[in-house]
Image: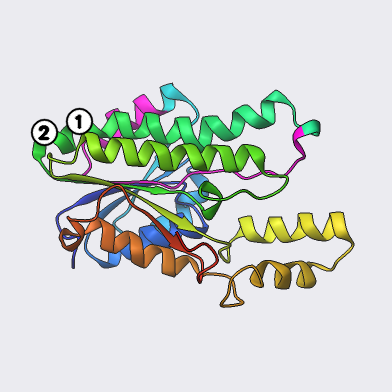
């Protein structure tokens, strides 16, 4: 029960990594607030956890963030997990594609953090955890908007971590490689469509990007999130921790 007595907000909680983190936090005793653009998408997870609080939250909409902040109140742990990932060549990319990735993956995390950070600083305890990506450390072809947004998220994490370093609040990022989620399945389908490979062949290609020759599991990301949210991790601050089997080694 490492997180007993803490309230945690997980954005993008309806599936994949967000869902796994919400479940792990609940098992560790936290009161979990589930954020998503659609409340209907949270119904099953809310029932599974039992004590979770679903809240409509669109991180790309400042008004939605303000309403959610009013409804939720203060939290001690914030996980900025909501994100999108699209694939298109730069020369074929329109402004909307670029802007949507920045709005959700980077500016959304900034705005949500800004909305919930002050009470953490005042209480001299808090945890901000960004779900970034190894795409925030290296580049991948055809994903310039996604890579740029995740590079920016890591930069935001590092700068904020130094701002609050003496306050009892820590700010860290988790950088997964390809994780067994719908996002990875969509990536495999895109590869298959563009290369003529089968979905299974495309998935094996993604697996081969890791030295462990596998996709990571959402629960592996959740386990690191639990650590970062705990008191034991109070000395971990401003870090961007890879979970990719060794594909990126810095």
- Seen from the viewer's position, the closer of residues 119 and 65 is 119
Q: Residue at x 86, y 66 (%)?
A: 197
Q: Residue at x 51, y 38 (%)?
A: 105
- Seen from the viewer's position, the closer of residues 49 and 115 is 115
- Seen from the viewer's position, the closer of residues 109 and 245 is 245
Q: The C terminus lies in which quarter of the figure?
A: bottom left
Left or right, 141 with reference to 243? right
Q: Is residue 247 magenta?
A: no
Over which residues does the magenta segment extend? 65-90
Asked whether the residues under the numbered discs 2 and 1 touch, taking CB atoms below 8 Å apart as contact, a structural biologist would say yes
Left or right, 36 with reference to 111? right
Q: Which mark is residue 118?
A: 1
Does 7 sit above or below residue 202?
above
Query: Label 1's element?
Result: helix
Does 244 sit above or below residue 151?
below
Q: How many numbered callouts?
A: 2
Q: Quarter of the image holding residue 196?
A: bottom right
| x and y, in percent, of residue 241 in the image | 39, 58
| x and y, in percent, of residue 226 in the image | 29, 62
Q: Which mark is residue 122?
A: 2
Q: Quarter of the image holding residue 189?
A: bottom right
Q: Quarter of the image holding residue 169?
A: top left
Q: The N terminus lies in which quarter of the figure?
A: bottom left
Q: Is residue 48 visible?
A: no
Q: Residues within 10 Å of mark 2 (few under 14, many from 20)?
A: few
Left or right, 187 with reference to 217? right
| x and y, in percent, of residue 225 in the image | 33, 59
């Amino acid at each position: 029960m490492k997180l007993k007595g803490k309230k945690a907000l997980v954005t993008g909680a309806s599936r994949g990594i967000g869902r796994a983190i919400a479940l792990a936090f609940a098992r560790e005793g936290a009161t979990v607030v589930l954020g998503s653009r659609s409340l209907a998408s949270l119904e099953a997870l809310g029932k599974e956890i039992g004590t979770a609080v679903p809240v409509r939250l669109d991180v790309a909409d400042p008004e939605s963030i303000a309403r959610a902040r009013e409804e939720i109140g203060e939290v001690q742990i914030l996980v900025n997990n909501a994100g999108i990932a699209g694939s298109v060549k730069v020369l074929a990319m329109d402004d909307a594609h670029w802007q949507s990735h920045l709005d959700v993956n980077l500016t959304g995390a900034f705005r949500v953090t800004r909305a919930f950070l002050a009470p953490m600083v005042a209480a001299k305890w808090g945890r901000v955890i960004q779900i970034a990506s190894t795409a925030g450390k290296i580049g991948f072809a055809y994903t310039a908007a996604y890579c740029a947004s995740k590079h920016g998220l890591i930069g935001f994490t590092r700068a904020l971590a130094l701002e609050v370093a003496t306050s009892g609040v820590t700010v860290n990022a988790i950088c997964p490689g390809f994780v067994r989620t719908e996002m990875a399945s969509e990536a495999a389908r895109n590869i298959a469509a563009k290369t003529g490979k089968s979905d299974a062949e495309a998935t094996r290609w993604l697996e081969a990007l890791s030295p462990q020759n596998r996709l990571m599991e959402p629960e592996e990301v959740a386990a690191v999130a639990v650590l970062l949210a705990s008191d034991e991790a109070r000395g971990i601050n401003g870090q961007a921790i890879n979970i990719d089997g060794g594909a990126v080694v810095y």
